Amino acid sequence: MNETTRGNRLHIAIFGRRNAGKSSLINALTNQDIAVVSPVAGTTTDPVYKSMEILPLGPVVIIDTAGIDDSGELGELRVQRSLEVLNKADMVLLVMDSGAGTNKFEHDIVTRCREKKLPVVAVINKIDIHPLTAAQLAACQAGLGVQALTVSALTGEGISELKIAMVKNAPAAWDDQSIVGDLLNPGDLAVLVVPIDLAAPKGRLILPQVQTIRDVLDHDAMAYVVKERELKECMQSLSKKPRIVITDSQAFLKADADTPPDVLLTSFSILFARYKGDLATLVAGAKAIEKLRPGDKVLIAEACTHHRVEDDIGTVKIPRWIRSIVGGEVDFHWSSGPRFAEDLSQYKLIIHCGACMINRREMLSRIMKAQAAGVPIVNYGVCIAYVLGILPRALSPFPYLQESFQHGQ
């Protein structure tokens, strides 16, 4: 993520009156002391651009602006520079002091955002000092005509809900991600290992496999599709070494054995963990598997409903692998379909499917709900690679994650 250029990052502009807590909100969102915080109004004088990570949103540029109520000749110049930021922003967070209410400044920003078709979320800060009633919040939302959330940048209250709102209000192009194309150059060869077993639909491939093939072709690379027992022969017959081997997670061990160490190896599910969610968070969640104890509750969540086959991955294989690591019985629970489990706090771990049937916003929302409940979350592909002991190898296309996992960061 450190290599993501500024142009490819979601640009989030922070607007608000002086001393509304804009800089404090940035620090709360990033969990770092990035922006200068001062009780003196007008500390931020010019737009400040900061490239950073807001997990699980990913790489963003936060733009901290001067107070929209700045006064005087110099203040008016500062406001004008702040308003120019709207030409570069993908989303606006409009920060207000809960004790100050709204006035022409906030309404002007909302109007400008509507004209530019910019998504805007109102953030009512400092509720630790001035709590709002439900009626007051509803009146604020009605008056501005945008979604409003209450937070305390000081205590962190409401920050998780704000991140979810940011995901849901991000522009449509934000989740137009690449599955594997950014790992390939034109002319590269990708070998896809596709087992044909009971779980494979008759006469066709499953959606992640089809989407990955299309993404390879869209990036002017070549796709070579084989079954797992044909991979070794394929590698020996190719005159050109492939850039990457992508396997179904259930064929990981065979693919690992037959793929040369200097060829990148990963799985469809790990690619989708990045494409549909936040791979870094899901990799970190894998470490919770070793901490499980007999009797712990584990939620296995699938985003769709499907016909389960003998030796099903979610109800049979993964529970079997987890029990072998734990050394005893685990209290497994299952959820499927569009409704995510309500009370997540009871679980020690959430193991989620590859999310091929939901969009990135929904998957990120689920990840953030797990984080808000303090529960680690991992997806099928990352989990399988971990329990098979080959997760570092499966992260070879992502050396920054491979290194952080191996060093326990």
Image (tube, rainbow, N blue to C red):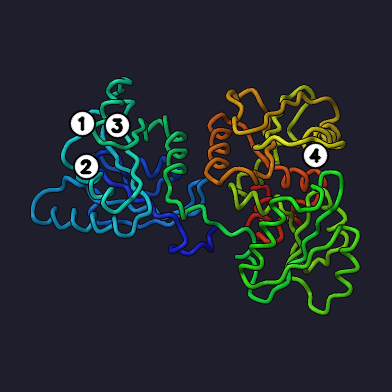
Which residue is rendered at x = 66% and y = 68% of the image?
217
Task: Locate residue 290, reporting x and y percent.
Answer: 76, 36
User: Mark 2–mark 3 contact, CB under 8 Å?
Assistant: no
Distance in Å between CA atoms under marks 4 and 1: 54 Å
> Along the polypeptide, which appears first: circle 3 or circle 4?
3
Mark 4 or 1, nearer chain start: 1
- Name the amino acid type tagged 1: Ala
Q: Nearer the viewer, residue 47 or 243?
A: 243
Residue at mark 2: 17
Residue 313 is marked as 4
> What's the mark number on residue 235?
none
Q: CA distance from mark 2 to mark 3?
A: 18 Å
User: Where's residue 400, x and y in %?
Assistant: 63, 58
Which residue is the site of mark 1?
Answer: 100
Q: Is 28 above or below relative to 182?
A: above
Looking at the image, which residue is at 59% across and 43% down?
Answer: 358
Pointer 2 or 1: first along the chain: 2
